[in-house]
Amino acid sequence: MKTADLLERLAENPAPVKSATGGLAVAIAAGGLVSFAAMLAFFGFRPDLAAAIHTWTYWVKFAYPLLLAVITLRSAERLGRPGARARLGWELLPFAVIAVAALVQWTGAAPPERWELLWGHSHTVCPWRIVALSLPLLAGCLWGMRRLAPTRPMLAGAAAGLFAGSAGAWIYAFACNEYSAVFVAVWYTVGMALVGLLGALIGRWVLRW
Amino acid sequence: MQFKALMLAALAGDAAAYRSLLTALTPHLRAYYAKRLSRRADAEDLVQETLIAIHVKRASYDPSLPFTAWLHAIARYKLIDHLRRSGVRRTLPIEEAEAVVAEENADAAEAARDVEQLLARLPEKKRALVRDVKIEGLSTAEAAAKTGLSESAVKVNVHRSLRKLAEIVRRRS
């Protein structure tokens, strides 16, 4: 086909495009709802929630994934826009926060208690539950990002994965009754990183255009 | 910024602005690819691919950013994609290059002939679709934009065509 003909055909329908960000938001909201429903169905709210909200470690567990989710979602959206700058920087903030919180708790505890802070009672299942709860969010986020045009599909996929992982972890935190910031710093991070890795691998394929 | 104004009007649904924009961009793209690719036909293919990408991905333009940065990033992505597909980056000691090229050419030529013979059995429109999607590597959305078919029509057509080709091959062997 001649370029001039192609151009005519394309120019025939410049129909105003739907906002790509709106599509992304809807896809993520849908994924989040599925994920939240799955959390309620399989685990339920932690029974001691009313008491837990008076401890500082509860709010660490609440804030760390939420902060990371907000920041990585923004990065994923930027990475989907050709020519936009996406610099690593803010992503490090939540990790700094959790590292400080974990360190404070670790050094403040008596040495025999430290291992209990680290292992908790659910470290063998926690990362996997986070991965499982993140999958609907990952699907939604990648789906929404296909409307955009990531010029680095693997990196954009990793950002989408970290977002899904941290949002999934935030949802899981309503069910998880671990009380230690050290536990969250290690096992939540492992779960979120796994989803980030998964996002990078899948993004490499599904975000190409 | 003239391009940006046209783009914003186009995104709002102004067909005339959109046509002017694409028309104005074409020589820029042609120059961009001509400078970077030795084969002229490749450059023109990429101009077309990039025009289609601009069309399909126009929602990814963020009006708060410079239009040229967006355009350049898309052109560069398509260029890298093309180079990767055509395997330009492979390196070889120069003494062996000739033999390998000759051999690869013979294999490739044979394979290309087989493919052409097979494709000739398809009706013209389907042949063009299969070529765009399966050989040139356009996405379904891009092929849909190029032909004016819906995306699902493109998928169905390509799928049926491939099944038919597979049948032909099976009967032959």
Image (cartoon, rainbow, N blue to C red):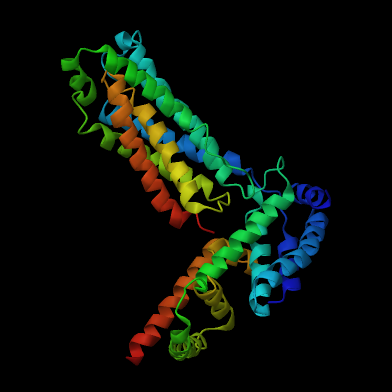
In the rendering, at what x and y percent does residue A45 appear? Answer: 30, 21
Which of A40/A181 is in front?
A181
Up the image or down, A100 lies above or below A78; here it is above
Q: Is residue B29 left or right of residue A102?
A: right
Q: Quadrant of the C terminus of chain A?
A: bottom right
Q: Position of residue A15 (x, y in %)?
A: 71, 52
Toward the left, the furthest residue is: A112
Image quadrant in which you'd find residue B143 = bottom right
Tell me what residue is drawn at x 71 percent, y 63 percent. A10
Q: Where's the N terminus of chain A, which quadrant?
A: bottom right
Quadrant of the rendered structure where residue A109 is?
Answer: top left
Taking the image as shown, residue A47 lies to the left or right of residue B158, namely left
Direction from residue A110 to residue B107 in the image, left or right = right
Q: Is residue A141 above or below residue B89?
A: above
Number of marks in the image?
0
Residue A133 in sight: no
Question: Quarter-wise, where is residue B151 in the image?
Answer: bottom right
**Residue in the picture at 20% in, 23% down:** A120
Q: Which is nearer the eye, A151 or A207?
A: A151
Q: Position of residue B54 (x, y in %)?
A: 67, 58
Query: Residue at image x 52%, y 45%?
Result: A144
- Residue A13 seen in render: yes
* Residue plotted at (54% across, 64% down): B139
Q: Is residue A79 left or right of residue A2?
A: left
Camera-nearest residue between B102 and B147: B102
Where is residue A34 shown, x and y percent of the image? 39, 35
Placement of B23 over or under B120, stated as above or below? above
Q: Is residue A177 above or below residue B57?
A: above
